[in-house]
Image: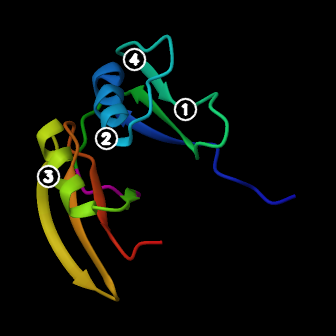
Amino acid sequence: MPLSIVQIVIDCDDAEKLSAFWSQVLNRPVDEGAASYFATIGLRAADSGPALMFIKVPETKQHKNRVHLDLTGAGWADEVERVIGLGAVRVSEHQEFGTHWVTLRDPEGNEFDIGAGMG
């Protein structure tokens, strides 16, 4: 039987605050029971893709992520501006390999991309 992604875990300082940011970005509600040390989005939702799990860790982010999320959708350039309005920070913009994307950081500094031609 093939494996599938169930959840993507994001280490953080405040799980409740960071899950609230990602909830707005993805237009998916934070699951009940969110706290500063643990929160999820979509853990029990059917057909909504992998869940996001936020877990408080004692250390702060020090370097570039080794894994990050790539997001895409209609009107992706407008979405970049919307997400910046939610608290993301623009890092850079790229066009290569038939893909156009913007790299951003969430409120705790985790990099992610929003772009076209990513799927």
**Disc 1 and disc 2 in contact, CB within 8 angstroms:** no
Distance (Cα) linking label 3 and label 1: 24 Å
User: Camera-side residue: 28 or 95?
Assistant: 28
Q: How many marks?
A: 4
Q: Is residue 77 above or below residue 55?
A: below
The residue at which mark 1 appears reads as: 42
Q: Which residues are magenta?
A: 63-67
Residue most extreme to the bottom: 97
**Residue bearing mark 4:** 37
Circle 3: is it few (<14), some (14-19), or many (20+) Cα within 10 Å? few
Quarter of the figure with residue 68: bottom left
Q: Position of residue 10 (x, y in %)?
A: 41, 39
- Residue 25: numbered disc: 2
Specify the amino acid type for callout 1: Gly
| Separation (CA) of disc 1 from disc 2 | 13 Å
Residue 103 location in percent, x, y?
A: 21, 62
Q: Secondary structure at mark 1?
A: loop
Look at the picture and state if 50 lies above or below 79: above
Q: Residues within 10 Å of mark 2 (few under 14, many from 20)?
A: some
Q: Earlier in the sequence, mark 4 or mark 3?
A: 4
Residue 58 appears in the picture as rendered:
no
Q: Quadrant of the N terminus?
A: bottom right
Looking at the rendering, which quadrant does residue 104 occupy?
Answer: bottom left
- SS category of the residue bearing label 3: helix
Q: At label 2, which amino acid type do we have? A: Val
- Provide the residue designation for mark 3: 81
Q: Give the main secondary structure of the magenta stretch.
A: loop
Earlier residue among tags 4 and 1: 4
